Image (spheres, rainbow, N blue to C red):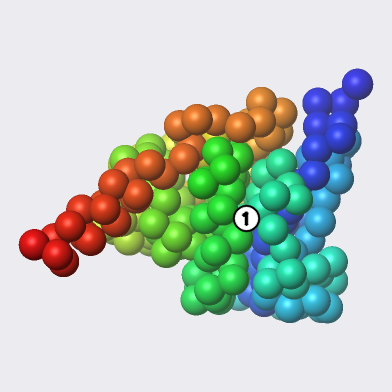
Amino acid sequence: MSKLEGKKIAILATEGVEQVELVEPRKALESEGAQITLVSLEEGEFQGFDHLDKADTFTADKAVADCSADDFDGVLIPGGVANGDFLRADEDAVRFVRAFFDAGKPVAAICHAPWILAEADVVRGRSMTSFPSLKTDLRNAGAEWVDEEVVVDQGLVTSRKPDDIPAFSAKAIEEFCEGKHGGQRPSGRDARIEQDVAAGHA
């Protein structure tokens, strides 16, 4: 039996996605039996890129506003500068990603994708990596950033760039196979919200 037989995985991407970071991990997941749903900011086509050059177009199966983390066993987020920036600016996309952490479900993000994790306030105290230009953003959001091809922390899988895809895909498959991780839940965020509320009433 394939490792991911019966598992439903969302891939979240939009305009400007780094094509190889979508295509290669998707192949790896599907080869292990995963059922993939391509989720974007809107249904329909969006443009992939090979660094700064236009590549293929992709067709989203669903708009993120119409999706729930309850319907999936995990989410994979490819990179690309524009893709990462558009995703982190979309409230529905941020809500969707945050819900995976709240449910303890595995999340895999490569290159510029961790931008949305910082926006979702789910990286505090987590060991992770990303494209090097995101290092300061992630550290400012409370992450422990390291320069390694793949970092796994309680269901969170991150990598830096296209060269890391083989290691990224392998670890993503492992974490999706394992399922929920208690350490994935951002309990610290709840505590901070309570502290902020208490301070406001002080």
Q: Is residue 123 above or below residue 172?
A: below
195 or 159: nearer the eye? 195
Q: Position of residue 131 (x, y in %)?
A: 46, 55
Which residue shows up at 52% across the image and 46% down it?
101
Q: Quadrant of residue 27?
A: top right
Percent across and percent down for residue 180 are 61, 32
Residue 49 can be seen in this image = no
Task: Return the residue nearer the eye: 23 or 74.
Answer: 74
For the point 80% across and 68% down, which residue is it?
A: 62
User: What residue is at 42 percent from the left and 64 percent from the top?
Assistant: 119
Numbered circles on residues, count: 1
Return the residue nearer the eye: 91 or 85: 91
Residue at the outermost top position: 1
Q: Where residue 201 sits: x, y (%)? A: 14, 64
- Examine the rendering and report whether any part of residue 35 can be seen: yes
Rendered image quadrant of residue 82: bottom right
From the image, which quarter does the N terminus lie in?
top right
What's under tag 1, amino acid-wise? Ile
Residue 132, by quadrant, is bottom left
At mark 1, the secondary structure is strand
Specify the quadrant that holds the C terminus.
bottom left
Q: Residue at x 42, y 51 (%)?
A: 122
Relative to 159, 198 lies left or right: left
> Which residue position is annotated with label 1?
77
